[in-house]
Amino acid sequence: MYYQLYQAYLIIQRLLANFPVNNNPLELRISPLLSEANNTLLTTLQLIQQPQVNEHHLKYLLSVIYRNDEALDPLTRAWGRASLWMDSASPTVIHERLKWYKAYKKELEQLVPNVKSLYGEEEARYIVPPLYRKEVGA
Amino acid sequence: MSWKKPRVDVNLYSQGDVDDWKYSTCNICSIGCGCYIGVKDNKIVGIKGNEDHSINRGRLDPKGENQWYANNSPDRLVTPLIRKEGQLVAASWDEAMNLIVEKTKETLQTIGSDGISFYSTGQGTLETYYTIAKIGRAGLRSHLLDANTRLCTATTEWCLFESFGADGVPASFDDVDLTDTMMFFGHNPAETGTVFFERIMERKRRTGKPYIIVVDVRKTLTAKEADLFLQLKPGTNLALLNGIQHLMVKNGWVDESFIKNHTVGYERMKHAVEPWTLSNTVEVTGVPEENIRQAAQIIGKTNSLVCTTLQGTYQSADATSSCVAINNIHLIRGLIGKPGNGPLHMAGQPSSSGNRTVGGVGTYPGNRNPSNPKHIEEMAKLWNVETSDLEVGPEKGIEEIIHLMEQEKIGLFWNINTNPMASLPNRERARKAFEKTFVVVQDPFLTETTEVADVVLPPAIWGEKEGTLENADRTINLLTKAVDPPNGVKSDFDILLDFAERMELKDKDGNPLIDYTTPEECFEEWKNVSKGRPSDMSGITYEKLRYYNGLRWPVNEEHPMGTTRLYTDFNFHTYPDDAQSYGKDLYTGRPRTKSEFEAIQANGRAIIYDTHYVPPVEQPRHEYPFWLTTGRLVWHWHTRTKTGRSPYLQMIAPEGYVEINIVDAEQLGILPGELVNIATPRGSINVPARVVDTVQPGLVFIPFHYGTWENNQSANELTVDFTDPLSKQPTFKQSSCRIKPLRNQVTVSESGSLEEIAELNGLTLEDLARVNQLTPPYRADIGDQIEVPLSRVNVDIPPYMPYRNIETFPHFNQAYRSPDDD
């Protein structure tokens, strides 16, 4: 779990390092989400290094991380389209950032088995949104 | 009774008397007018209004009057079609349904349950929607159930969740008959709900009430009747509402006692609107200071207020936040739950709210929260399935589903009675996505969407099936079957039952998941599901609906005759285990956890929010200097699948066009009716120009009804596919574009003077001069290149205004004008 969360944290750090890119209005909405992801991931990393993990608090933090990305994902995709259409950032920069957003999502998907093993299938459903945890052949 | 006098509108074409007039409800817009269907020899030959129905007292919208022509259209599909070697070919129902079943099973195995998506409509019956919900959620375990209601009224749902904890518009049409003040915010009922508007105007002519405020970017037919019209810049709805809230707070036009006893969140809202001074609001919105001041004063002091919203709000930037701001206004004045008061966020389609209510789209049936384990358990018990079969979490909107299609994560997309290849924004993107998926289209006609279908199923339409509809004010109305559908055609409901049977969908005891066989039996099951929930319909029967001409939910033991308005006890659905959703952050759209919702401590009180303005994502700039907005005409419905088959409606408004302000047309040398090219970064179309003063300079308007793949008039070739962060409703109303007249070049020769060139091209000399920006005395030398319009047509769209004497009030009129205007 630590590995995926840390990787996710590094990606968010990278995304925050060159932000805002073009001051598109969507960045006004993306900004608090990136900050929230950053703070929540950091708190979670600190929490899981404690000798006794507060599972209730961890559940809340994980719930926030996933819900945060549920909101972030469509906004960043829209930002990509808007920036290309408005020619307000270089296509290389846009595609690079979209690649990192996608990589971030991937980390969260890879985290799912850990969440399930920690909380069980049923409870994990209320932490992780469906599209991150759906398995083939349901 | 609402209207002073009935007036029975009739549209009938019959040789000899009709055999019968069958009880029904109009199936076009969201008003829900009662009607009778004229039948002769098992064929629909006309329609007349139901004079006993309180909603319309016999009146009908022009589209409603003409809807029956589609039933008899010779191009009705009467057999399923399957795509073979690139062509759609006729197939039997067995072949088509077995193929769908095969693809469904294959998708479940290869992608999983979220590889299946239903995309339905706002024009269907509650019974069809409920069956989609049960099959989709309990049978296939998918949570990708969406509908064209996403494009229409998803924002209604989300603003109601946010402020009041559950869906259901607080006010009703009865409140419109009582109120002192009405504000139409981005709502043009004179064209989108003519019977509703006529009802308001009839009272206004009689009593002088209500005082009407209209907020719109265009001088619509509704705006022409306003006492106060606020014409704002595109995408600034929330800025204006923040400015109005600012003035209300500043002047103490608030009900402190109501705020204290029945709401939470006021201080945050107060803080948020602090910067929205008059001068800031004027600068952002472009509305004159005095008009804003007057609007705030009227709203702040009126004894009663009904605010309506529609696509001008829902399809604009800050959609949900703007509707929440309107809820805020009602809450800080305590103008809710009382006669003549309350927000009345409208619906567009005849039963879009019904789809939400019974769970065909949005949350679980009966306003149940998909993130609340207790609600999931209730549904599992009611449907006799395992709780783990029912998916958790908020729904996905169509833009997100298209994204999944692009990634080839959708194996089966079942499209029911809607035409997304004409109605979705940025439709070229949508088309490419659809082409990556197995698409089933259920539609009575070949449409732009059947062109990307793998299977087409022909369903029955209005007058050929029974069921119930929910209109814009929670009224449930009855549709009855007037005639049999054409041979080979089945109702949506029967198609779904057939699918469930072929899929052998079972409950947890091994019994068929769907055990009802008729819409009425389905409704009886739904009544049980709804019991005790906000949309309780346990007190309704088909017979009662017919007898009383519709009833507003909740209808139960406590309210056997329905409920005129919600929240009369000021007790809102904001207890955590009552709420239909834990809501989302209003600024980012981030879904809240249960504990975050609990932390608000609303517990029965309404929630007032701080609303923060974010400008539209795409804005005019050098390459694309104009705002583009899209919308409807009074004469057509959606993509004209039905209204385009009425000879009368089609003749009045046969093709697409663009409305451009006189000043802009002058500057670009565009003649009225001249063919122009409108281009955005997504695509371009060619349409004639309609030069008007109803759009403001810098803005153009294109009706979205038109555009096959071939004729290049579709507004959605141009529109952006950005969505509201909460409701996921697309922002159709704000894109940027450029305009270029399409011209031929003519060389001036010895034998061809300017006068002759003008005459040859059907132009006056002045027109030709304008096109070429020549100044008098007009002259050209031999060899000069002269431009002439490629084509020119008369774009004359007559208004429909039975409530207005056109001769007496021919011009735009406003009660108040700023001295700065002079």
Image (tube, coloured by chain):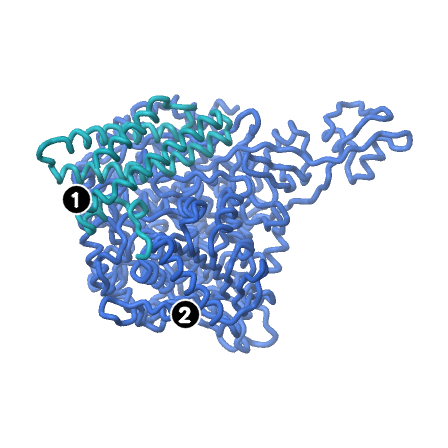
Task: Decide: few, some or many residues near mark 2? Use Cα within 10 Å; few <14, some 14-19, many ≥20.
Answer: some
Query: Which numbered dot is residue B494?
Result: 2
Q: Residue furthest right?
A: B750
**Which quadrant of the structure image shows residue B780?**
top right
> Which residue in the structure is indicated by mark 1?
A118
Looking at the picture, how far across and down is residue B526, in whole percent? 28, 64
Up/down of B200 relative to A88, above or below? below
- Whole-number angstrom distance, CA of label 1 to CA of label 2: 45 Å
Q: Colour of chain B?
A: blue
- Residue A86 in the image: x percent, y percent? 50, 29
Tag 1 and tag 2 share a subunit: no
Q: Chain of mark 2?
A: B
Q: In the figure, B268 relative to B631: above or below?
A: above
Q: Is residue B1 left or right of residue B790?
A: left
Q: Which residue sits at x=34%, y=59%? A: B136
Q: What percent of the width, then of the height, locates residue B561?
A: 27, 63
Q: As displayed, is residue B275 above or below residue B583?
A: above
Name which quarter of the figure residue B761 lies in.
Answer: top right
